[in-house]
């Protein structure tokens, strides 16, 4: 695959790795400020959700306990304003329900500019998963603008509409180094020096449950654990807010059983275009660094009740260069809407080659055309 020059546009968010905890959430976050004067907070850049949220001082002192410990104090920000102060529930699925109110303030960007955000302020949450959370909030990167949550800001669309990123580079790229605990998320571009060969996975909506089309999902033809074919014709999702493999109860439970029976064999995911991802035991077995399971080395597979889905995040993203790509429609003037195109998963120089590239599909990264009109193929 040829590698074009890196785009001049894009905003690079430095990212850091907190301790790996056995709660299924990514340990990766970007640290920036919210409000005026800026209050330092840690945000996941999360392709597994569709809204922006932060832990806040709406929480009682005994509520919203989490490992990172930061809270946004809206009363100390001169730029904060309410959008809706009626408290409503927001479901985090198996984690439980968060009570939220809606406000608006400014987020500091790494390029020295600021971005106005409509976001949820948490007023209550509890549970062991939240208690082990390495970040204070999340910036959702849903698969497209039709799938964002309510009035909350879709940061990629907003940055594009404000001219901060080019509509010709509709990419969100992640580069995480687990050894150094340093990484980045580039919104509006990609870095060709960061990857070698890889595969493109066209987006297909996950429709087993209504309302989760915002996740970045693709068709997967086979899922193997060692010599055992565990599943066929299911879906795969790449979620930067997650850590473990999660999803279909039967698939995850059979995976754990086969890992035990076969003595830690590789897990192999094969895609319709012929490409594959092979995950050896030294990647999926992770030593827990904090929380109740600290010091244990555990296989990172968790049943989550998501029918016919295999979802994974930092467990493999730390070994790959990953890109989420949109298709862009120009609605008029400098207003754009985004639809999902798909995901790229690449081997990285100096890392184990866990990606087997496809020989059937020839697709390259580069500038993309913008559709003028309101329909897409």
Image (cartoon, rainbow, N blue to C red):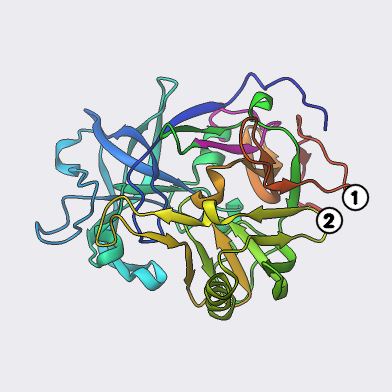
**Label 1 residue SS:** loop
Residue receiving disc 1: 360
**Label 2 residue SS:** loop
Q: Quadrant of residue 64?
A: bottom left
Residue toward you, 161 or 97: 97
* Disc with the residue nearer the chain's start (2 vs 1): 2
Crowd tier of the residue under label 2, counting other residues whose Cα lies within 10 Å: few below 14, some 14–19, many 20 or above: some
Tell me, yes or no, whether the highlighted magenta stretch contains residue 68. no
User: Could you tell me how far apart the alpha carbons at marks 2 and 1 are, in whole angstroms?
Assistant: 6 Å
Identify the residue at the far front of this view: 263
Identify the residue at the far bottom of this view: 250
Which x, y percent locates residue 135? 31, 47
Q: From which residue to which does the magenta span run?
A: 161-176
Residue toward you, 298 or 74: 298
172 relative to 345 in the view: left or right? left
> Does any portion of residue 48 appear in the rendered image?
yes
Q: Residue at x 23, y 54 (%)?
A: 66
Crowd tier of the residue under label 1, counting other residues whose Cα lies within 10 Å: few below 14, some 14–19, many 20 or above: few
Q: Quadrant of residue 31?
A: top left
Image quadrant in which the C terminus is located: bottom right
Specify the label residue 271 is tagged with: none
Which x, y percent locates residue 139? 42, 46
Image quadrant in which the N terminus is located: top right
Q: Residue at x 35, y 69 (%)?
A: 95
Residue toward you, 364 or 17: 17
Which x, y percent locates residue 244? 48, 59
Q: Quadrant of residue 59?
A: bottom left
Residue receiving disc 2: 273
Does the CB distance between marks 2 and 1 fall below 8 Å? yes
Where 49 sits versus 258, above or below?
Answer: above
């Amino acid at each position: 695959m040829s590698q074009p020059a890196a785009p001049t546009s894009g905003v690079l968010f430095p990212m850091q790795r907190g301790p790996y905890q056995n709660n299924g959430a990514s340990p990766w976050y970007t640290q920036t400020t919210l409000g005026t004067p800026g209050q330092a907070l840690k945000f996941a850049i999360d392709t597994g959700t569709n809204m922006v949220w932060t832990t806040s001082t709406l929480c009682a002192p005994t509520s919203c306990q989490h490992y990172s410990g930061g809270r946004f104090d809206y009363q100390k920000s001169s730029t904060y304003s309410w959008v809706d102060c009626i408290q409503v529930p927001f479901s985090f699925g198996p984690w439980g329900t968060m009570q939220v109110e809606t406000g608006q303030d400014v987020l500091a960007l790494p390029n020295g500019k600021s971005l106005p955000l409509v976001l949820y302020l948490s007023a209550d949450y509890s549970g062991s998963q939240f208690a082990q959370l390495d970040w204070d909030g999340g910036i959702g990167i849903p698969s497209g603008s039709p799938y964002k949550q309510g009035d909350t800001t879709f940061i990629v669309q907003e940055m594009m509409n404000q001219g901060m990123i080019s509509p010709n580079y509709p990419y969100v790229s992640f580069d995480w180094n687990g050894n150094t605990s340093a990484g980045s998320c580039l919104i509006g571009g990609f870095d060709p020096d960061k990857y070698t060969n890889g595969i493109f996975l066209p987006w297909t909506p996950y429709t087993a449950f209504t309302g989760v089309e915002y996740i970045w999902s693709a068709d997967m033809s086979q899922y193997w654990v060692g010599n055992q074919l565990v599943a066929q014709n299911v879906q795969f999702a790449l979620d930067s807010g997650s850590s473990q493999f999660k999803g279909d109860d039967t698939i995850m439970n059979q995976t754990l059983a086969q890992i035990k029976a076969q003595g830690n064999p590789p897990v192999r995911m094969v895609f319709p275009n012929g490409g594959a991802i092979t995950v050896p035991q030294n990647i999926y077995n992770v030593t827990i660094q904090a929380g109740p399971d600290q010091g244990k080395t555990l296989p990172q597979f968790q049943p989550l009740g998501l029918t016919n889905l295999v979802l994974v995040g930092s467990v493999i993203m730390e070994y790959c260069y990953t890109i989420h790509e949109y298709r862009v429609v120009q609605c008029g003037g400098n207003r754009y809407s985004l639809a999902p195109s798909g995901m790229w998963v690449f081997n990285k120089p100096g890392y184990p080659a866990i990606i087997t590239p496809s020989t059937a599909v020839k697709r390259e990264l580069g500038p993309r055309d913008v559709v003028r009109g309101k329909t897409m193929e």
